[in-house]
Amino acid sequence: MDSKPPPTIYDIASKAEVSITTVSRVFNNSPAVSEKTKKKVEKAIAEMNYIPNAIARSLANKLSNTIGLIVSDLSNPFFTDVIDGIEHVISREGYFAFNADTRYDIAREKKYISRMLEKRVDGIITFSTNESTHTLIKKAKQLIPVVSVQSQFRDTDSVNTQDAKGAYKAVEHLIQKGHKNIAIIVFDYDNLTIKSRIDGYIYAHVNYKLPVNKEYIFKVKFCADAGYEMTNHILDKHPEVTAIFGYNDKLAVSSYMAIHDRGLKIPDDISIVGYDNTEMASIVTPKMTTVAQPMYEMGVRAAELLMTRIKEKNLKAEPKLIVLPLELIERKSTREL
């Protein structure tokens, strides 16, 4: 009798010379896999007489072995690192993620949550949930596990980094350097992350006994050049502003471009602070001061928590909150006044 163990997904990946994530995507008919790669994987499966354990589990347990991943802006490098962490965890379990980009649009966010439920995903990871969307999330939680990232609701599993604290650190840094006229640029979207960062901006002013000028809180509609256009508006209408705090590094880098195009210099003419510590923060000139979040770990912890909930099959488990640390990274984009 042949006692050789049956092949695994790792054996298939090795034979086809692809990653296990690619093999998993082939199992789930993902359009992200090229036809050439798909044929290589299918050939390896046939030659090794492989029966996917994930598919067998799906049939036995009525699981789809997919999760829904709802993010705000897939073009933001922040999400690249977070998704890498998520996929590292779920691929080991034979899972694949359906990614949905809301583009900071409430209607799109609600539509994608409903669509995920229609697709019968086994769980959802969602980012920066809107207050009104949370009602739909609570309904979804009656059917499948949901983990919310950067949105701390008491009734939902959450992975958070205390956005108000991070924004406070950023603005405090500027205040301690002598800045009093500090603008903040955020998206014109009602979610907890944006609200928390505005709160942190305000708390820093109050704590240092500086007046909060509501005209310095700039909300911009989501688009590719949002930070660029808003920075030009700030420099035109409020020349007294000496520092800009960007809601994320992507917005802050857009501010860089606007400032450079006007013939001004950072930090000589204006100081800039970003948020996230994505790769772009360290490759712009000058390198940008920013608030660092453990992006990859956020993805790992959110995915681990979701996988645990899926296996537990207990939708009434006590919600868990995981809080990860933040750090202000000081570089060359800010100066003393």
Image (cartoon, grey):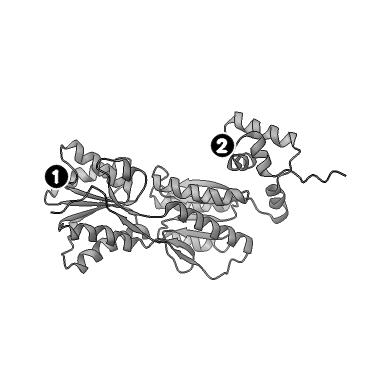
**Quadrant of the rendering where the C terminus is positioned:** bottom left
Residue 295 at x, y = what percent? 42, 52
The quarter of the picture where residue 180 lies is bottom left
Q: In the image, what residue occupies the spot 37% across and 63% down?
A: 162
User: Element type at marker 2?
Assistant: loop
Residue 12 in sight in this render: yes
| In-image side of 283 versus 263 (left or right) | right
- Mark 2 neighbour class, 10 Å CA radius: few under 14, some 14 to 19, many 20 or more: few
| In-image side of 91 versus 293 (left or right) | right
Amino acid at pointer 1: Asp
Residue 256 at x, y = what percent? 24, 42
Amino acid at pointer 2: Pro
**Quadrant of the rendering where the N terminus is positioned:** top right
Q: In the image, what residue occupies the spot 20% across and 54% down?
A: 183
Q: Which mark is residue 190?
A: none
Residue 189 at x, y = what percent? 34, 54
Q: Is residue 33 above or below residue 331?
A: above
Residue 219 at x, y = what percent? 27, 52
- Relative depth, front residue between 215 and 208: 208
Q: Which residue is mark 2?
A: 31
Q: Which residue is mark 1?
A: 236
